[in-house]
Image (cartoon, coloured by chain):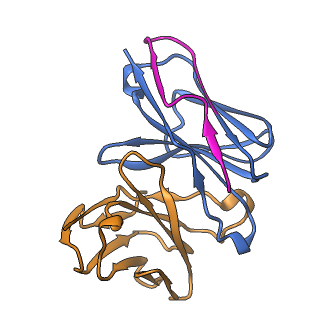
Amino acid sequence: QQPVQSPQAVILREGEDAVINCSSSKALYSVHWYRQKHGEAPVFLMILLKGGEQKGHEKISASFNEKKQQSSLYLTASQLSYSGTYFCGTSRLPPGGATNKLIFGTGTLLAVQP
Amino acid sequence: DVKVTQSSRYLVKRTGEKVFLECVQDMDHENMFWYRQDPGLGLRLIYFSYDVKMKEKGDIPEGYSVSREKKERFSLILESASTNQTSMYLCASSPTTPRSSYEQYFGPGTRLTVT
């Protein structure tokens, strides 16, 4: 079952912050975040493993609460280059070998305006 | 740089035709994936291969088959194309080592239109 992402779309001005959520009805082992710019392939941002860790990538960070089966992506002081569609991908098994497949959410469209 | 290439960016086929979509990766990755991307539905996994000649169905395998005879190449086959298979098809590959964070590298996609 696909994880649910919210919001479906968000419009920001440069410098504003945003939070994108990813929720699953099943217990998760890991959450992966990707960004897809218009007309381009999705690009990996980060992976969060079970344990409630938080990670950062430039001004983009994320958290994973395995008890709630939820992950949040935080974009601070947004830049024009952050525009795109953000996808979370979830896995119920430890990564490696035959268990590396992900179930992706439906995506969150982020538009950053000048 | 990891490179995943797909045989065509745009493809137009007729209903009932057999369609082959090819994907090649140059990083010796064990895992390869085929997704389709449709507006509002995100990325949906069609098939997954974790080794040569090994495959596993994804969430929407109906109407599709795959072939992986060599490690670097993963083919998606539409046995008899139908209009509801009009979509963007994305191929991806990933290594299986923790150091890599299991990152999936995506190809540029093939926009398939079935008329």
Q: Quadrant of the N terminus of chain A?
A: bottom left
Q: Does residue B12 belong to the magenta stretch?
A: yes
Q: Which image quadrant is residue B56 in?
A: top right
Could you say which is closer to the camera, residue A20 or residue B111?
B111
Looking at this view, is A67 or A46 the one in front? A46
- Residue A13 position in % (x across, y down): 18, 72
**Relative to residue A15, is residue B90 drawn left or right?**
right
- State yes or no: residue A92 in magenta: no
Quarter of the image for residue B96 reads bottom right
Give me the chain that's blue.
B
Q: Residue at x 37, y 26 (%)?
A: B84
Quadrant the C terminus of chain A occupies = bottom left
**What is the drawing colour of chain A?**
orange
Left/right of residue A106 with respect to residue B59 in the rendered view: left
The region drawn magenta spans B1-22
| Residue A42: x %, y % from top left | 47, 55
Residue positioned 57% across, 75% down in the render? A29
Please say if B11 is above or below B34: above
